[in-house]
Amino acid sequence: MDNHPIEGLMKSTLENLKDMIDVNTIVGDTIETKDGTLIIPISCVSLGFAAGGSEFYQKNVPSTDIKYPFGGGSGSGVTVKPIAFLVIKGDMIRLLPVNQKNTYDKLVDSIPQIIDTLKNSFSQKSCKKNKEEIKQEIKDAVEQELKREVTVEE
C-alpha cells in the first residue's frame, strides 16, 4: 500500500522541527562569571503544527481507478521564551524566575548606580586610561550591580 502524500508532508515538517528544537533550546548553555558562579538559562518552548491536503478529481474521467492529483501543505511555529535562570554559586543553588517587566525595570533602575560607580572610579584616578581599562571598569561595575540585584532578590 502506497503512502498518502499527506504523510510525506507531515514527516518532513516533524523532522525539521526535531532538528530545530533540542534540549539546549529549553536549558541553555551555561554561563560562568569571574567568581565561578554558574548561570543556566531556562526557556519555555511553545510549538504549533498544522497539515492539510486535498485530492482534486477530473470532471470528464469516469474511471474510479485513477489517482487524483494531490495538493497540500504543512507548517509550524515555534516560540522560545526565557522563564528563569538557575544560579549555582558554591553550595547554593537558586532558581530566579524571570518576570520581564520587573527585570527590565530593575536594569533601568540600576543604570544611575552604575554611572555613579564609573564617575567615582574616574574621579579617583586622574591618570589616563586606555580603552581596555575603561571597558574592564564598565564590565566590572555592571557585574557588581547585577550581583547586588541577585543578593537583593535572595
Image: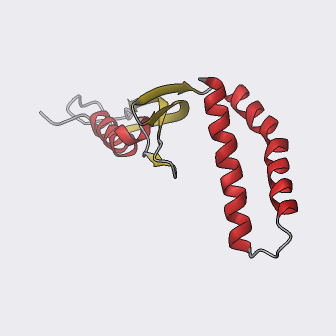
**Residue 50 in which image quadrant:** top left
Q: How is the image coloured?
A: secondary structure
> Which one is in front, 79 or 67?
79
Q: Position of residue 104 (x, y in %)?
A: 73, 34
Residue 80, can we see it? yes
Question: Up-down: is 35 above or below 102?
Answer: below
**Residue 13 in which image quadrant:** top left
> Which one is in front, 106 or 63?
106
Q: Residue at x 20, y 32 (%)?
A: 65
Q: Residue at x 28, y 40 (%)?
A: 8
Q: Quadrant of the C terminus?
A: top right
Q: Quadrant of the N terminus?
A: top left
Question: Up-down: is 86 above or below 33?
Answer: above
In the image: residue 1, left or right of residue 142: left
Q: Position of residue 145 (x, y in %)?
A: 70, 42
In the image: residue 48, left or right of residue 138: left
Residue 46, can we see it? no
> Which one is in front, 70 or 101?
101
Q: Residue furthest left?
A: 1
Q: Position of residue 132 (x, y in %)?
A: 68, 71
Q: Position of residue 105 (x, y in %)?
A: 77, 31
Q: Residue at x 67, y 56 (%)?
A: 139
Question: Up-down: is 88 above or below 121?
Answer: above
